Image (tube, rainbow, N blue to C red):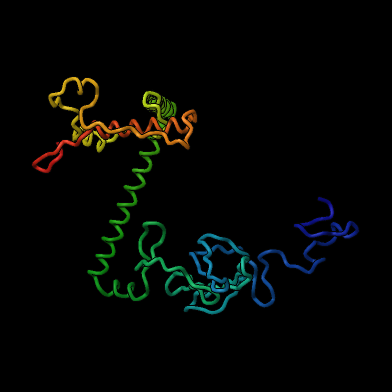
């Protein structure tokens, strides 16, 4: 757009003769200032707790900030860099510095690195451990420790290579014939849908036959075992009573009270359900196993 340069306004009469940064007395991003600082894009190397937030909030690994970068010292000949960021949620400042001695980052102000409970810091997911200076010195002086370290790194490398091969094979298998995989999935879905539809029709017919609107659950193995323990009506010498359905002691059906209206559909439905329940309870007895096991 005419009149703008890198997001800064330039008057038309000065366009082409100067820059927006010079007019507004701003330096370009990343330019080194006179005090030795510069603004860089910094990415959080690990999850960090912000101590300025109340309660303390966590900043996830990989979140990016505009940080003020400054050299604050040396470790032998390696410079130590400081990155000072501003947490946009609370406005608090957090300072993170490089640690060349341990090849890591440390939080020196405004927060604390999240503790993952790991004994050794590892480079990458499933990578080799990052050794401290003492561990490196021990491996230099001790041949057995150096050999054990090489064996451990080799095992990690072999495991990672096998994992990568498995991922490649799984990807090739899944994408070898996507049309066939989609067809198999749709066929299984149609089959299951037909089974569910038949079950719903069976349950609907059972509700209509019993004259109830109660929810009927599907059959389970426990229901089948309990059904085998029920004894329905052995003949007790009264053939007429068995034929009439009076297998056990007849119970008087519950009567509709005078306050309830027999013409009310809800009352009739409840009465039928209660009469059915009493009839089933009166005509049913549980078979007893003398050995204490399910039949």
Q: Quadrant of residue 124?
A: bottom left
Q: Is residue 147 above or below residue 248?
A: below
Q: Position of residue 105 (x, y in %)?
A: 48, 70
Q: Nearer the viewer, residue 162 or 74?
A: 162
Q: Is residue 43 above or below residue 80?
A: above
Asked which quadrant contains residue 121, the reply is bottom left
Identify the residue shown where x is 33% and y is 30%.
276
The percent position of residue 235, horizontal first and vertical second, equals: 14, 25
Is residue 77 at least partly visible in the picture?
Answer: yes
As drawn, which residue projects farthest toward the right? 13
Left or right, 101 with respect to 250, comes to: right
Position of residue 199 in the picture relative to residue 30 (left or right)? left
Q: Which residue appears at 64% of the width and 75% of the height? A: 36
Residue 224 percent location from the top left of the image: 24, 33
Q: Residue furthest left?
A: 291
Task: Confirm whether residue 184 shows in the render.
Answer: no
On the rendered structure, is 22 left or right of 97? right
- Which image quarter: residue 109? bottom right
Name the quarter where the C terminus is drawn.
top left
Quick one: 244 or 89, which is closer to the camera? 244
Rendered residue at 40%/65% (across/down): 116
Residue 222, position as x, y percentages in the image: 25, 38
Q: Please name whichever residue, 138 or 256, is drawn nearer the observer in this view of the structure.
A: 256
How many badges with numbers are in the image? 0
């Amino acid at each position: 757009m005419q009149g703008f340069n890198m997001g800064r306004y330039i008057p038309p009469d000065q366009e082409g003769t100067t820059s927006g940064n010079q007019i507004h007395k701003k330096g370009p991003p990343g330019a080194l200032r006179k005090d030795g600082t510069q603004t860089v894009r910094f990415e959080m190397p690990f999850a960090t707790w912000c101590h300025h937030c109340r309660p303390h909030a966590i900043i996830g690994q990989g979140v990016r900030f505009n940080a003020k970068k400054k050299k604050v010292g040396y470790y032998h000949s390696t410079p130590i860099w400081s990155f000072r960021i501003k947490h946009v949620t609370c406005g608090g400042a957090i300072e993170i510095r490089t640690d060349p001695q341990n090849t890591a980052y440390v939080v020196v102000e405004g927060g604390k690195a999240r503790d993952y409970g790991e004994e050794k810091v590892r480079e990458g997911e499933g990578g080799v451990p990052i050794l401290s200076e003492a561990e490196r010195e021990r491996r230099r002086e001790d041949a057995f420790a150096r050999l054990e370290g090489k064996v451990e790194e080799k095992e990690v490398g072999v495991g990672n290579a096998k994992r990568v091969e498995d991922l490649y094979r799984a990807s090739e298998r899944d994408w070898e014939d996507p049309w066939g995989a989609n067809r198999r999935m749709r066929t299984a879905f149609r089959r299951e849908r037909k089974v569910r539809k038949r079950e719903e029709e069976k349950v609907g017919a059972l509700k209509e036959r019993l004259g109830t609107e109660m929810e009927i659950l599907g059959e389970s193995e426990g229901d089948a075992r309990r059904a085998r323990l029920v004894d329905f009506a052995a003949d007790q010498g009264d053939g007429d009573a068995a034929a009439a359905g009076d297998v056990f002691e007849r119970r008087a059906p519950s009567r509709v009270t005078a306050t309830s209206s027999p013409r009310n559909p809800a009352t009739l439905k409840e009465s039928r359900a209660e009469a059915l329940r009493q009839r089933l309870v009166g005509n049913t007895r549980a078979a007893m196993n003398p050995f204490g096991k399910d039949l």
